[in-house]
Image: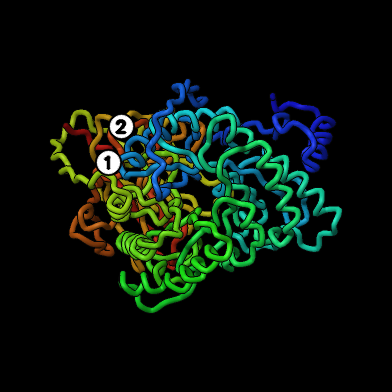
Amino acid sequence: MNRSNSKLCLAFLVVVLFVNACSPTESTIPATLPPSPSNTALPTETPAPTITPPPPTPTLVAEGDFIQGVTMSKFSLRLDSSQSRQVITEYLLPAGVKYVALSPTCLGQDAMDSQIDCEYEPVPGKTGPPVEDEELIHTIQYLHSVGLRVVLKPHFMLISKLEDNLSGPELGYRWDEETWRAWFENYTVFISHYAQIAEENQVDIFVIGNEMQYATHREEDWRRVISAVRSVYSGPITYAANTWDFEALNVKFWDALDFIGTNAYNYFYQPINDVSIDGMQAAWEPALQRLEELSKQYGKPVLFTEFGATSKEGHNLGIARDWIAAPYNGQAQADHYTAFFEAIQGRPWVRGVILWDVDTQPLQGGPNDLAYTFIAKPAEAVVRQFFGGDPMTHTLVPQFVEIPADTTIVYDDELSPGWRPWFEEGAKNFPDFQYPDAHSGQFSIRVAFSEYIGLWLVYDPSLNLSKYKWLEFQIKVGEPEPKHLFAVFEDWTTGMNVGSRMALVNDARYIEGGQYLPGTWQRVRIPLIDLGLTDQKSTGFNILGCAWPCDFDSQTADVLLDDIKLVAGE
């Protein structure tokens, strides 16, 4: 059914669905794509290509005794895109992944709002655009066509909590019974709609809710939700309990589900001192024992609906949160994965694990990415080993020969034609493009870095990087020197901001002298292949003083940049 139903029909449907008295095939959730992000200072956006999916095939991976999954939840590019499919075929399949969880999201405004909005405007830095039904269905069909099974795990989140890094009040704060009834009516329509999609597209597992501890105390309401889902979806279902207050122990409706589902992070947030693999494995034991008891109580296996680790210092101590600044530590992430995988082995009551999470764009991860993705980090080898995937293969970086005639000058006393600066709206600090302290010529660029502001250079309309092998520039830092200075390329041609992997400017492999020498001009040459770039298009690059979350030193001295060029090679 088209999502343009009238409000009257939807209101009628809400009531009818909630009492479970009509055909569930008529449940719909209105959702349309919001306008693409726009900024007059950015290149003209082009619409994402329409991809015709191949027909589904019944040749899926064997269901097996253990669910080996990963969630594709971040949508830097459209879920149904060639780049998203590249992630699936180049990273997930070789890693031994058998299940892919998809998490379309709808939002509530704040803790006092009982409405569920699937037509929301994206929250900058927090959500991508809504996932349309057609896009979701195409992706399910594509995953089945390459042999993967699908978990559909719709998310409901509060905008206020996204903006506050999950620190705001919970849903239902001071609600009366009438408001609770209205919210559960809306939620039943929302979740039944996705259950119908799951049934019609042979989704293998359906998750009825995620981390909703503020509402799961209303047991009878959830049993009605479960009944509505069961009436339209015939496959196995579960609920994804939160980690931080061990919600799984408080849920009373596990008997009505097929699995006990729980998200699992940081030994359920118990701080530890021993971050050896043995120490971390032991730290999981108390939580696993409690889950085993719960499994015996209800006679249901446990599915870890989320498990993951960031690649930053401090995560393995059990105290780090997503928004806490810390240096990159890819090996710590790999050790955390190893400890968890070893801790859950040999426990027949564990049904499987779904890793959190990967993005839809191929250039995620890498040696400076602090987020949860395991791609292009040491943890990828651990996942492949545990999931029985292909072993990691390491190829030598080719030795390019510079072609001076094809090298492009970006800045030499002034920006070259086609290049222009872009400033964050509301920025107080703007680079000075004619600062009289130059490596060569008369001028350099002086940048007063802040936590979010650096040097952003845009090329109109876009630049094909296929002939370029290095980003090169001269840099002079002062004291105190910048702690976290990164180079990253961007591409706005899809209508979304897609970044490359990041390179640390003072990486000893890139900077002349192997480290910063304050007060001295030094050459920096960064291979584009280290950023994951080969023949992509780009709309420019940034030199950033921070990559969120990071610990920015507000006393950092101004940085000078000169002789910026894209060096061609073969």
Left or right of 462 in this view: 164: right
- Label 2 vs label 1: CA separation? 9 Å
Residue placed most toward the observer, 399 or 361: 361
Locate residue 39, reporting x and y percent.
56, 36
| Number of the label disc, if any, that sits on residue 465 | 2
Dot 2: element: loop
Residue placed most toward the observer, 249 or 72: 249
Give the crowd class for mark 2: few <14, some 14-19, many >=20 residues within 10 Å: some
Is there any visible trace of residue 419 in the rendered image? no
What residue is at 64 percent from the left and 51 percent from the top?
157
- The kind of residue tagged 2 is Leu
Tag 2 near tag 1, CB within 8 Å: yes
Locate residue 314, reporting x and y percent.
40, 69
What residue is at 74 percent from the left and 48 percent from the top?
224
- The kind of residue tagged 1 is Leu
Mark 2 or mark 1, which has the lower sequence index?
Answer: 2
Above or below residue 272? Residue 295 is: above
Is there any visible trace of residue 495 in the rendered image? yes
Which residue is labeled 1 in the image?
A: 528
Residue placed most toward the observer, 125 or 228: 228
Above or below residue 297? Residue 279 is: below
Above or below residue 34? Residue 174 is: below
Left or right of 135 in this view: 183: right
* Screen quadrant of the N terminus: top right
What residue is at 62 percent from the left and 47 percent from the top?
208
